[in-house]
Amino acid sequence: MYIDFNSEIPIYLQLAQAIEDNIIRGTFEEESQVPSTTEVSINYKINPATVAKGYNILVDEGIIYKKRGIGMFVCKGAKEMLTEKRKKSFFENYVECLIEEAKKLDISIDEIIKMLERSK
Amino acid sequence: MSVIQVKDDTKYYGKLCAIENISVSIEPGKIYGLLGRNGVGKTTLQNLMTNRLFPNSGEIMVDGESITENDRVLEKMFLMTEKNLYPESFKVKDIFYWTKEFYSKFDLEYAEVLCEKFELNKNKKFKSLSIGYKTISKIITALASNAEIMMFDEPVLGLDANHRELFYKELLANFMEEPKTIILSTHIIEEIAKMLDRVIIINARKIVIDDSTENLLKSAYCVSGMSQNVDKYIEGKTCVNIEQMTSFSFVIHTQYSSQGLKE
């Protein structure tokens, strides 16, 4: 798991997102173990409380769960749930940015559609 | 776990005031960053907290007990200084041996494991070591002290990137193995920022900020644009840094007032 931390978003959110990305990509399969909070804390040199905060978000959302004494595991159905969630935010995260940049460069919607078709 | 309370401390070196009416409470089980420019009083504050220096006025308590000449309380605290105070003839292993005399919980086995990880030969004389390895010897001594409060003043002086990385990782592993209070004072802020629970910033003999890392980061903003617009926007705000290139400005401002009080 590689995380390129930037300073604009809180670390715990970036961490939660990185784990989500890996679940969506299939790196962390459902019912498989994800890195422990201790491992993450040491590897990325992050305060343990920050790591716990990131993991707690995922636990609350039903994406990972804790097996007492063993570690954290990916919930069944997590991949589908996350994919749905990301699809919902796809418009505001990607399409809106695309339109904004296109406006700045005076690229019309038609031209964008042509570009998209070309990249198929 | 122990709480350190610094109450209204002032310290003069002759006529020079190093610290002025500082009050701060260090909560247990947290990692603190003690930050500030050169010569603002960071080392003085740490020396006062460990009774190596005595304040001209004010007092320092650990768990409600005064630290002055109080060995039982002082044993709970270990300060790694940038100064090298060991006798010339000491080998690294002698430092471990003598530290154990003063810190009864000193873990020799752990110190040896760390020596191997850092590739430090404990049979070498301390004075013959390079700057980096002198620092490493002191880091290892601090980590193995098993003190409830570990203070590090310039802990990465002379360390290469790999050794700094190893130090941060060992420090976190140690912290998670047995929760304790850690105070880190360094100028390489980017490298430790993610590790800190709280940040204390000293400026001109006084504490200007004492807050959680999260609040501190949330309170800082960057603005950039045409100078005339930026100037209007920053009016009345506390600016940390202002840079200008022709008619453009780049400003970092915070919600803290210059006295360190939240607006």
Image: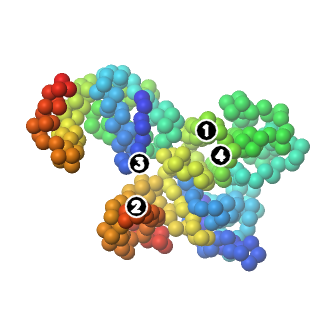
- Structural crowding at the residue carrying mark 4, measured as other residues with C-alpha within 10 Å and reported as few (<14), some (14–19) or many (≥20): many
Q: Residue at point 17% right, 31% down? A: A115
Instruction: Give the image location of residue B204, x and y in percent.
Output: 59, 70
| Residue type at numbered disc 1 | Ala
- Let me know if residue B219 appears in the view: no
Instruction: Give the image location of residue A56, x and y in percent.
Output: 35, 40
Instruction: Give the image location of residue B20, x and y in percent.
Output: 62, 74
Distance from label 2 to label 3 (Cα)? 17 Å
| Residue type at numbered disc 2 | Phe
Distance from label 3 to label 1 (Cα)? 21 Å
* Residue bearing the label numbered 2: B250
* Residue bearing the label numbered 1: B161
Between B1 and A54, the one lying in front of the other is A54
Q: Residue at point 35% right, 23% down? A: A27
* Residue bearing the label numbered 4: B156
Q: Secondary structure beneath disc 2?
A: strand
Label 3 close to label 1 by CB (< 8 Å): no
Label 1 or label 4, whichever comes before in sequence order: 4
